Amino acid sequence: MQARLPAASTRLAGKVALVAGGGSSGPGWSIGKACCATLARHGATVCVLDARLDSARDALAAVQALGGKGVALQADVADPQAMQDAVQSIMAEYGRLDILQANAGIGKVGGPEDIDLADWERIQKVNVDSLVIASRLVLPIMREQGGGAIVAVSSVAGLRYLGYPHLAYNVTKAAVIQFARMIAQQYAPYGIRANTVVPGLIDTPRVRHTVARMFTADGDAEKAGAARARQVPMGRMGTPWEVANAVAFLASDEAAYITGTELVVDGGLIGKYA
């Protein structure tokens, strides 16, 4: 049974969430877009932030179609001024910020001899520096409010080698996990929790149109999907909803005593010997 859009609830009612990287790279449901819809489904006001305004608006439209509310924002997560402007606009509109869901992430295939240093630096900025930028903005707000939740999205690529050289992505996704652990320790006395969701092989628009080239010579998305599914003990790729459900749980008060840890959503992948 694959997870789909969850039933409506009030578990996040009254909370304002900023989803960084909330759009989708193509038609369908990305992890970020599914997180926006899921958080809204549980009652949160969702501020959808994406580098592309049309992507942010598309995700917001999905939120509104479910009866949710929020706003679409455009910003490069690695741009300190753009992020400051975005957070200031959220505070001007809603007066609070309870959840930071850090979802933005990019990558490029290549090992240490192949990766261009400019690509390495850009991947580091988007995947890791963005967490510093966002945290410096939201942590003072959460501390003043008396609490909040940060949920970062990493990847099993940050835990193990997945069969092809993806050095910059793997290294930065490992850094995401440690970053959340450090935030959790330092800010626990202020009622601020920080955790990481670690997705495995998830069926998203990016995977279908980009990662397919890593698995098949002709870039056939169907063949690539089947190849990825065979890697997973459960015999299938995960859905963005399965990741989003984990995000919603860690953002909610149901996880009030959970901080500084990782929730792996991978169908058993990293438990395999080979």
Image (cartoon, rainbow, N blue to C red):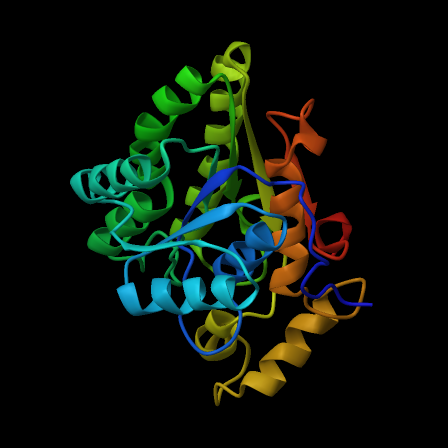
Residue 234 image point, x, y percent:
81, 64
Position of 194 relative to 53 (above/below): above
Instruction: From the top left corner, tell me how far across and down residue 40 is, in percent.
Output: 55, 53
Left or right of residue 226, residue 22 in this image: left
Q: Residue furthest left?
A: 81
Task: Classify residue 139 by image quadrant.
Answer: top left
Any part of residue 160 in sight = no
Residue lying at 63% horizontally and 54% vertically, measured from the top left? 243
Identify the residue at image location x=42%, y=76%: 26
Q: Is residue 36 above or below residue 159?
A: below
Residue 205 or residue 241, whichever sits in front: 241
Identified at 55% across, 15% down, the residue is 188
Q: Position of residue 92 (x, y in %)?
A: 27, 36
In the figure, residue 145 lies in which quadrant?
A: top left
User: Is residue 39 at all visible to an observer of this figure?
Assistant: yes
**In the displayed structure, does residue 242 sit left or right of residue 178?**
right
Q: Nearer the viewer, residue 2 or 216?
A: 2
Q: Quadrant of the N terminus?
A: bottom right
Q: Nearer the viewer, residue 110 or 263?
A: 263
Q: Based on the displayed image, in which of its 4 quarters is residue 80 positioned? A: top left
Q: Looking at the image, is 219 positioned above or below residue 245?
A: below
Note whether 141 is above or below 89 in the view shown.
Answer: above
**Identity of the residue drawn at 48% across and 14% down:** 186
